[in-house]
Amino acid sequence: MSAPIVEPAAELTHDERRRYARQMLLPDVGEMGQRRLKAARVLVIGAGGLGSPALLYLAAAGVGTIGIVDDDVVTESNLHRQVVHGSADVGRAKVDSAADAVARSNPFVRVVGHGERLTADNAQELIAGYDLVVDGSDNFGTRYLVNDACVLTGTPWVWGAVLRFEGQVSVFWPGPGPTYRDLFPAPPEPGTVPSCSEAGVIGAVCAAVGAAMVTEAVKLITGAGQSLLGRVLVHDALAMTWRTLRLTPDPYGTPPTRIESVDADREPSDDLPEVDAGELAHRLRDHKADLVLVDVREPHEHAENSIPGSILVPLADVLADPGRFDPDQPLVLHCAGGVRSARALRAVLAAGHRDAAHLRGGIAAWGRLSHS
């Protein structure tokens, strides 16, 4: 057993004893471990595919205070894997939908909603208020922010990632063990790693990885067993295997001294012309007849949600015939987050288009503007 990271709460109520009776039968938990869970403050980054099962199982385990960081809204395509939300929540802020689900699951849990995006400006302050971070984010930029804020605050964190039929889980803790930068010293080249919106993911894999993340969180809080600190758990659902890789701190690694944004999930701009969501909204309102807005995502993505007035031309079709657009008519391309639209824009500009740009941050940025 390792040392627990949380001091126990003073006592459990009669109702809490009844609720957690089966869990307290475990010798590695017992009443003292349950009191530690009650006292614990856990921050969950993202109320999506991994955050959903994590939130429900953290609440069921009796974690006393659960913070939720998310600035997105629920869409219909989320529902096959983001089980904390339901059909009636489509269009709601994820942080509100998730908070309601946690409250329904366990009325003894206090939920703190942070309906904002984790940034270099707020990451350290947010994380400093919690004992443990459970990171269910879906992009490299946020993971590096979490890592660096945890290093600066000395906070342990549980990391998980999923894609298609695969998943990974680990525990990072500056000082006692490796950090995320020991596993990934630098972010991958932008555009080389597809997102779930591009490559897909099985909902049950999110559940398996999310459950493993919560098991690690409970172990860290109570001191039970041996955590994944110094190991990476790799899940292959197609082969139905779990294997463990060893991870040691990089002796030449330099810990961060401050938090900086890592824009790891966008295509290199090469000074590509861009518009932000606010500028696009203005142009659509005032110059709609002169502007062609092209969605380069796939048909199922466009059918799910689209920017009013946009036309669908999937990326493969743009790359096959980049000269298909009138070179004298203003053109704005967009995708989910800016990676595919950047590729399309390069091709269009190379074909001789004289007034083309793409939407910075993609339809995700447009959605944040629409719900702000």
Image (spheres, rainbow, N blue to C red):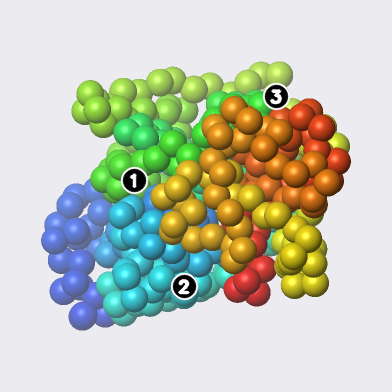
Residue 164 x, y percent position in the rendering: 37, 35
Q: CA distance from mark 2 to mark 3?
A: 43 Å
Residue at screen point 76% across, 29% down: 351
Residue 112 x, y percent position in the rendering: 51, 73
Q: Identify the secondary structure beneath mark 1.
A: helix
Residue at screen point 61% across, 58% down: 310
The answer to the question of whether label 1 and label 3 lie on touching residues, with beta carbons closer than 8 A, is no
- Which tag is nearer the camera, tag 2 or tag 3? 2
| Residue bearing mark 2 | 91
Residue 39 x, y percent position in the rendering: 42, 67
Q: Amino acid at mark 2?
A: Gly
Lateral position of residue 166 relative to residue 72, left or right: left
| Residue bearing mark 1 | 206
Q: Nearer the viewer, residue 119 or 360?
A: 360
Asked whether the viewer can see residue 243, the reply is: yes
Q: CA distance from mark 1 to mark 3?
A: 31 Å
- Which tag is nearer the camera, tag 2 or tag 1? 2
Asked whether the viewer can see residue 159, the reply is: no
Q: Amino acid at mark 1?
A: Cys
Return the disc, 2 or 3, that comes first in the chain's sequence. 2
Q: Quadrant of residue 25?
A: bottom left
Residue at screen point 28% across, 72% down: 105
Q: Quadrant of residue 23?
A: bottom left
Location of residue 270 with respect to 208 vertically, above or below: above
| Residue bearing mark 3 | 253
Lateral position of residue 297 relative to residue 253, left or right: left
Lateral position of residue 109 relative to residue 69, left or right: left
Q: Nearer the viewer, residue 280 or 167?
A: 280
The quarter in which the N terminus is drawn is top left
Return the disc, 2 or 1, that comes first in the chain's sequence. 2
The quarter in which the C terminus is drawn is bottom right
Q: Nearer the viewer, residue 215 or 80?
A: 80
